[in-house]
Amino acid sequence: MSGSSLSAPAARPAGALRSYVELARPFTLLPPALGVVSGAFTAWGAGGTKAPLTLALVLPIVWGALMAATLNAASNAINQIYDLEIDRVNKPRRPLCTGALSMGQAWGFTLLAFVVAWVLAWLADPTSRHECFWIVLFTSVLVWAYSAPPLRTKRHGIWANVTIAIPRGMLLKVAGWSTVKTVMGVEPWFIGAIFGLFLLGAASTKDFADIEGDKKGGCRTLPIEYGVARAAWMIAPFFVLPFTLIPIGVWRGILTGNHVLLMVLGPLLIAYGCYTVWLLVRRPEELAATENHPSWTHMYRMMMVAQVGFALAYIF
């Protein structure tokens, strides 16, 4: 009896910690952190001028990577708060659905994560202009607008994709750049646009498996609005066309990284995108029947390959 009474209090914090980790969805935190690090190394090598690798150079990058992961955790949490009824259909094992966390605990986690992300963004500043902070503050507004009323753009078709693509595609890359150099120039925004255009279509990949819950929640995602087959063809170009901007950027002198590596990266991502499109459109009905369709996994992998590829092209 005494052993059981001693072990019970210790089990509760462990269970709560596990639930908070599930709320944060750790699998999704690595890509944004990698995006910031990639953006930072891209800035470091841009123009062929590489500053010495000192603590003063590296520390803002570390703060920026932690910021991106923390902000994404806040985004995941607020999305689960406002998607509770949808998740009860689509993802019933999530901690708010099971009652492992209360709504108050989820709100506390969300607000704390936002504040920590803002502090880290303020620290990720090599220029005293705090460009990363202002980018992250604007990103936070878009994250809120995607999930929360009154805008809740998740309900409005392509606007949902826009409010994912701008913060998680374009601005993520620019925020990473800002941890090393000023963003006042064409190059960081051109690179950010590549990632933003990719996510403008690719962000819909997960919507196909969520149709039932999204319908009940009043969300008019592309697969709901246009049907599974048509929506698959609508998003297909975004897996290929954005990466044609890489060789264009090299030819126009906008991208200043290693031209050989960039000219390899562009066709590689185009080929990978074509393969993912084939998975999307060959049997589109499977997209709505499989929770983790291979195209969704490849979307994440494409993002990682692009991030690592850009970093390498600017380091060497």
Image (spheres, grey):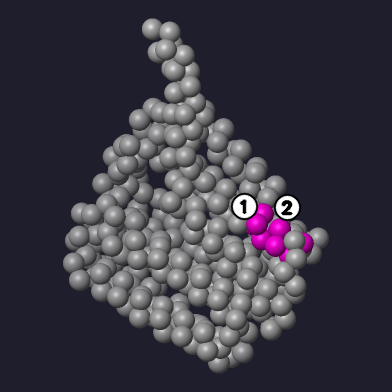
Q: Is residue 230 left or right of residue 164?
A: left
Q: Is residue 295 left or right of residue 184?
A: left
Q: Amino acid at mark 2?
A: Trp
Q: Which mark is residue 253?
A: none
> Is residue 15 in sight in this rendering?
yes
- Of all residues shown, which one is farthest toward the right? 128
- Determine which residue is flagged by label 2: 122
Q: Is residue 54 left or right of residue 166?
A: right
Residue displayed at 31% across by 37% down = 92
Q: Give the mark nearer the N terminus: 2 vs 1.
A: 1
How many tags in the picture?
2
Q: In which quadrant of the rendered image does the N terminus lie? A: top left
Residue 21, compared with residue 53, is above or below; it is above
Residue 267 coordinates in the image, percent (x, y): 41, 84
Q: Which residues are magenta?
A: 56-64
User: Which image quadrant for residue 315?
Assistant: bottom right
- Determine which residue is flagged by label 1: 67
Residue 31 coordinates in the image, percent (x, y): 49, 59
